[in-house]
Amino acid sequence: MQDDRPDNETWATTAMVTMLYSELRRIARRCIGPHNPAPTLQPTALIHEAFLRLSGPASSWNSRAHFLGAAAIAMRRILVEAARRRARRGQPGSHIAADDHDLPIELGAAPEDLLTLDEALDRLKVTQPRQAEVVTLRYFGGLDEEQVAELLGVHVRTVRRDWQLARLTLARAFRARNCPSG
């Protein structure tokens, strides 16, 4: 006779999603924004897809911030995959201008902007992995500096410095895309 009960990891993820559902919806709405890379992808569907990716043998959460960070990474991957599919179909989006006080794009940006950000984050991860993680946790996860510092085990000043340096690096990537030299 087959046991239909969820395993402990799935149970823990389900409990965490239930407890933080309203916060996950806020993050999902921010991530999707007005330029949804997949118009059929709504906040609830994004949360459920992230839940499926978070469930499994490696899902043990040390804290609320740890779980929200993992959810942010899962949502980023889902949105980037949707943006890639949309770009392959040739569906254009609008460009969002850089803001000196934040990242070069807003959450919910047009698919081509999201792809540029994803590529720039992947390059940043090679040279400055903590900076890339800070961006993912703050930008996609909506975590504040203190939550990111706790999750990464660093001081808040380190998170601020990483955030500033990463924003400069990412802004350069957007300028390079918009003003190719040659």
Image (tube, helix red, strand yellow):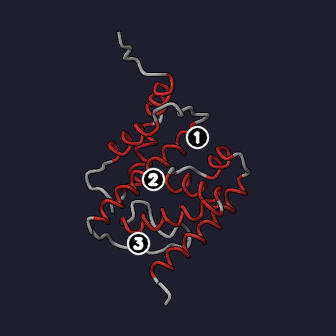
Amino acid type of the residue tagged 1 in the rendering: His
Choose the circle earlier in sequence order: 3 or 1: 1
Dot in front, 3 or 2: 2
Amino acid type of the residue tagged 3 in the rendering: Ile
- Name the residue carrying label 3: 96
Image quadrant assignment for residue 97: bottom left
Q: Residue 95: image x %, image y %? A: 38, 73
Element type where label 2 sits in the image: helix
Asked whether the residues under the numbered discs 3 and 2 touch, taking CB atoms below 8 Å apart as contact, a structural biologist would say no
Asked whether the residues under the numbered discs 2 and 1 touch, taking CB atoms below 8 Å apart as contact, a structural biologist would say no
- In the image, is residue 177 above or below residue 26? below
Element type where label 1 sits in the image: helix
Closer to the camera in the image, 107 or 116: 116
Amino acid type of the residue tagged 2 in the rendering: Arg
Q: Residue 77: image x %, image y %? A: 44, 52
| Residue at 49% across, 65% down | 119
| Residue at 32% across, 43% down | 45
Q: Residue 125 shows which numbered tag?
A: none
Q: Residue 113: image x %, image y %? A: 41, 68
Dot in front, 3 or 1: 1
- Name the residue carrying label 2: 76
Which quadrant holds the N terminus? top left
- Name the residue carrying label 1: 66
Q: Residue 156: image x %, image y %? A: 70, 53
Query: What's the distance in space between the residues labelled 2 and 1, CA to CA?
Result: 15 Å
Query: What's the distance in space between the residues labelled 3 and 1, CA to CA?
Result: 30 Å
Image quadrant assignment for residue 83: bottom left
